[in-house]
Image: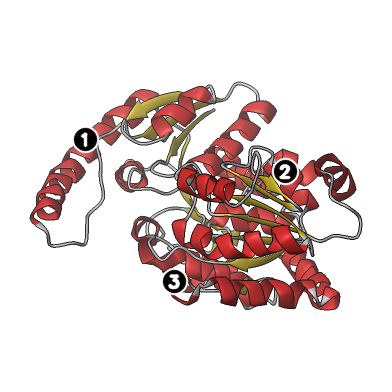
Amino acid sequence: MKILFATGGTAGHINPALAVASYIRETVKDVQILFIGTADHMESRLVPDAGFDFKTIDISGFKRSLSPKSIVHNVKTVFRIMKSSGESKKIISEFNPDVVVGFGGYVSGPVLQTAVKMGIPTCIHEQNAFPGITNKTLAKEVDRVMLTVEDAKKHLEPKNDVTVTGLPVRGALLKADRDMARAELGIPDDKYLVLSFGGSLGAKPLNDAMFDILLSSADSGKYCHIHSVGTNGSEFLTKFEEKGFVNGKKGTVEVRQYIDNMDVCMAAADLVIGRAGASSLSEIEAMGKASILIPSPYVAENHQFHNAMALVNRNAGFVIEEKDLTSEVLSNKIDELLSDNEKLKAVEKNAKAMAITDSRERIASIILELAK
């Protein structure tokens, strides 16, 4: 059996594809898996590091700006799109897959469209509640469409019916134990733990809003708090040091550059604050955590806002848009939730009810069914 995956651009597209591909490799005998991506995005590193064969095509997306630089980029993109179909056909013909799977990103477009024209079974997975342009187009052509959340369906015109599969979550998170995690982190039984982060790179608006909150919490000790400033947030570590933090710690507050034990921190947390990427929300749901979500307004189609609203509409989370984000607004929301344990538990229960913890198996089942 031969399976071809097409994905790239961001970890939100790549990591779920790798999770499914790894599961298939572990459970299916005599399977050959090939990934197609681009040479200049993170898939060129992540896919080979995971032990999968990898080939590239030259493709890019359009920029919406009318600046001279963007116009030049868009002209190049038109030529890349024309060229990429031929590149895709060559790779597909040589590999001769039984099924072609798209996990999003610009690279999925030409690869899946070429596979459709060649009569090869195809399927796509959409991570967000508001699908991107590539998957909106492909949904009209491929054999199966898989969704992380039901909400995405209303934005699609699929050739066939869709299947809600959820999004793969790291196994370590599913196995994490709250009591053991809190003991490992040294969180007292009588203290709530707030966990906040803006992604691996960090988010300056969140760091700005958190600064006064963390200083106040460090002095009051009313709850424990772990915050990540991100790899682009070094200036904030210096600012905290100037305010008396030693090795990132003061009182019940710990500030880190990066959280490398997210499974432990998430398991121990009573409230999670962060962006609304699809992977983060799937983890929040899988672990049944209450959350305050601050969607990034800088992503395509404002999809993080739609992701967050999927929880909000089910009383499974709360949202503060970045345009409304201040230390006071965020602090008041934290205090409101931590002072109402009944509300906190209800939100946790609703978040947990949204979780699909066997998404790898569901996605793999559809892929293998098409391959046969």
Seen from the viewer's position, the closer of residues 45 and 35 is 45
* Circle 1 SS class: helix
Report how far apart the C-alphas of labels 1 and 2 lie in the structure: 43 Å
Left or right, residue 238 beside residue 283: left
Judged left or right of residue 159, residue 247 is: right
Spatial separation of the CA atoms under disc 3 and disc 2: 33 Å
The residue wearing badge 2 is 263
- Residue 299 vertical placement versus 34 (above, below): below
Along the line of sight, the residue nearer the viewer: 370 or 64: 64
Q: Position of residue 119 (x, y in %)?
A: 37, 43
Q: Give 291 or 36, whichever is nearer the viewer.
A: 291
Q: Is residue 52 visible?
A: no
**Figure disc tally:** 3
The residue under the point 47% across, 70% down is 322
Nearest to the eye among marks 3 and 1: give it. Answer: 3
Check disc 3 and report the residue beneath it.
155
**10 Å crowding of disc 2: few (<14), some (14-19), many (20+):** many
Looking at the rendered structure, the kind of residue marked 1 is: Gly
